Image (cartoon, rainbow, N blue to C red):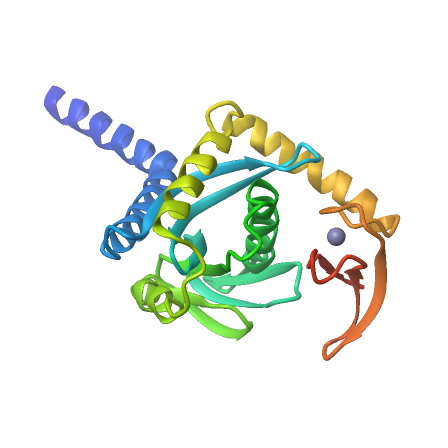
Amino acid sequence: MKTLIVLSIIVAVGMLLLKIFSPHIKGFIGELKVNLRLRLLGKKFVIIPNVMLENPNGSTSQIDHLVISEYGIFVIETKNYAGWIMGSDKADDWQQIIFKEKHYFRNPIKQNLSHIYALKNVLSDYHNVKYYPIVVFVSNATLKRLNVSQPVIYANRLRATIKQNCINKCLSLEDVQIIKQRLQSSDVSRIVSRRQHIQNIQDNIQEKQFKINNLICPWCNGDLKLRSGVNGMFYGCSNYPKCKFTVSC
Ligand SMILES: [Zn+2]
């Protein structure tokens, strides 16, 4: 009887721990999957996982994976969502439908654009470097009705997607190493704790909304201008094409 009680307690505690840590474990496994696939690209491709860059305005950009190569820099945003995924280039949020429930998450294409903006600040002297944003879904997601002009892919397409863009060289192998060192020394992830990053996001969301309300670009402080596109009216940055910030009306 005593053994049974002890066993039940162990099972209950185990299940509780699994429930608490399962999103972290899933996230960790997802990152690992991407990492392993990237390692297979070969030695000429330099992989930097988890870089946090500080923008001139004090905000931070957390980049899941960077692949630096002679062909340019691949900027990879990893998503661990299951269920149906729907979204477009311009939408502020994307939709996840799982167990008949709708959830919203930040448009990963826009996240990647802001990461590229932060990278360009750090690498401002490399004018010719090409940037390739890629969004990778690592869980059992079904990518439905995506209206996107950039690669949004399953993990098994990652290497092929990178290889497709390895046509024209824009960096020397020496540049690749210099850029790697510069990005590693610009990485503030150890200094800025994750908690502070979350606080920054909350502050940034408020500041971003304040700026948008006053028609100021939250990325570069340029003016926001009303523009018309195929999907209707939107606000775009007056510093386009240097700054690609957009927000729907
Ligand atoms: Zn701007």
Residue positioned 58% across, 61% down in the render:
94
**Image quadrant of residue 224?**
bottom right
Residue positioned 43% across, 55% down in the render:
171
**From the image, which quarter does the N terminus lie in?**
top left
Residue 209, image x, y percentages: 78, 46
Viewer-nearest residue: 234 or 175: 175
Residue 206, image x, y percentages: 75, 39
**From the image, which quarter does the C terminus lie in?**
bottom right
Residue positioned 40% across, 68% down in the render:
165
Residue 241, image x, y percentages: 70, 62
Residue furthest bottom as drawn: 230
Residue positioned 51% across, 32% down in the render:
186
Question: Residue 24, relative to residue 165: is it above or below?
Answer: above
- Asked whether, in this view, residue 130 is left or right of residue 11, the answer is right
Residue furthest top as drawn: 2
- Asked whether, in this view, residue 133 is left or right of residue 124, the answer is left
Question: Residue 184, relative to residue 114: is it above or below?
Answer: above
- Asked whether, in this view, residue 207 is left or right of residue 38, the answer is right
Question: Residue 245, relative to residue 199: is it above or below?
Answer: below
Q: How many marks?
A: 0
Viewer-nearest residue: 164 or 15: 164
Residue 55, image x, y percentages: 64, 37
Question: Residue 76, relative to residue 29: is it above or below?
Answer: below
